[in-house]
Image (cartoon, grey):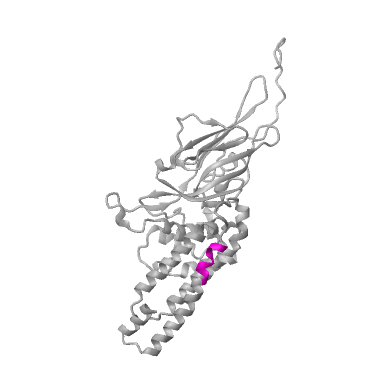
Amino acid sequence: NDMVSKSSKLLGGDVAAAMARVTSFNRWAIIEHDLSTSTEVLRPPEDMHRLEERAHFARLMETHLEMYILVLSQMHRSLGDRGSTQEIEASLTRKAQRMARLLLPDLILHSQSVSLSEASRQLQIFGSSPLLSPVGRRCSMTKPTPRDALCCRLSSQPEFHLEFLVTCLWLPLMDPMDPMEHPIHGPNFAHPLRVDGFSTETSCLIAPDASMRQPDELPDLVQDGLASCADHQVLQSLLQEWVQRTFFSDQEQIHYMCGDPSERHITLLPFTFETDGLCLERVRLFQNDVVAVLTSAHFESRLEHQLSEIKRSTCRLAYRDSGVQYGGLKHLDLLSTLPPRRRHKGNVCDHCHWASPDSCVFQPRKPRPKPQLPHGAVRF
């Protein structure tokens, strides 16, 4: 009230006009307060990691964030064009960003289940709010940054709902608040991780982050179908292969390697989620960028001569520190970067070629007759 009244009096506004703005502002402020205090009730418990269970809360949180941003926008508009509103606008911006930090992770993880009409509405609400996203006012700039240029294109394409939420809303919130925090090396920006993979005729490898691959280290062998790392480590590679044996049927082996993400300038967030299949598919941007690390994978044996599938896995939201802003892929046709399909379930070979899906050389094994033992040999 004091800020609104002061801004009116400084420019000689009459008392009636000032009180009208105060009344309008207060009406929306009451609604904002109620929405803010009810946020924690709508969010799932912190120890609820199963994505299928969190989905029951996701729809409420989507609507809640939309309403909250609309209410803040009404508070901003009620100030009018008169007076100095910088202090109030800064306060409203902090409120919008705080709410976005709380709710965006769940919206990102469930964005693939949002219809195109719902995605279009969210792009309109979030993209047009100057309190949450500067996309609208930066699209007219002569030389926008790579991130702004990409966001201007994504804001009108609901097919890229996930990419917009991550690139234009969530990653900027993860950037350092003050660029002067890094006076020597320059400012850092939050950047997605890049998934890498390759295959041979008998094996496939996927590295949830390409920079963490350590090919010279000896991998661990998966026991009882579980690949898991210690709390401070993450899975840096999964290798699934057929091992040919002379006197026995070919045998499947699954190897994994753990690594410390902090050594690769990767920041882990306190947000863990578990889902059926490969959890990285839930946060896959464009072709092979992700905003999470893989912490465990549980494999389920299938029929003989078929590779085991990833039954379920656990991920943790994460991003990389980078000296440049994320601008996505430099394709003129964004639709060409959409994954042909998001296959959550499957084996390692079904996920190892996100960047080049047609280049996989792995050949599924065909049943072979049991080899005959040499004369006089005994099978154990």
Q: Is residue 40 magenta?
A: yes
| Residue 324 point in image, percent of width and height | 36, 52
Would you say 265 lies left or right of 103 here? left
What is the quadrant of the C terminus in the image?
A: top right
Q: Is residue 24 visible?
A: yes
At x 53%, y 54%, the residue is 336
Would you say 4 lies left or right of 334 here? left
The residue closer to the viewer here, 164 or 219, is 219
Residues in magenta, as a range: 34-41
| Residue 293 point in image, percent of width and height | 50, 45
Would you say 117 lies left or right of 219 here? right
The residue closer to the viewer here, 244 or 103, is 103
At x 70%, y 20%, the residue is 371
Give the answer, above or below, for where 75 lies relative to 245.
Answer: below
| Residue 339 point in image, percent of width and height | 56, 51
Give residue 221's quadrant in the image: top right
Q: Is residue 123 magenta?
A: no
The residue closer to the viewer here, 318 or 158, is 318
The residue closer to the viewer here, 200 or 77, is 77
At x 41%, y 53%, the residue is 190
**What secondary structure is the stretch in magenta mostly built from?**
helix
What is the quadrant of the N terminus in the image?
A: bottom left
| Residue 50 point in image, percent of width and height | 60, 50
Q: Residue furthest left?
A: 184
Give the answer, above or below, for where 25 lies relative to 253.
Answer: below
Q: Is residue 134 visible?
A: no
At x 41%, y 86%, the residue is 19
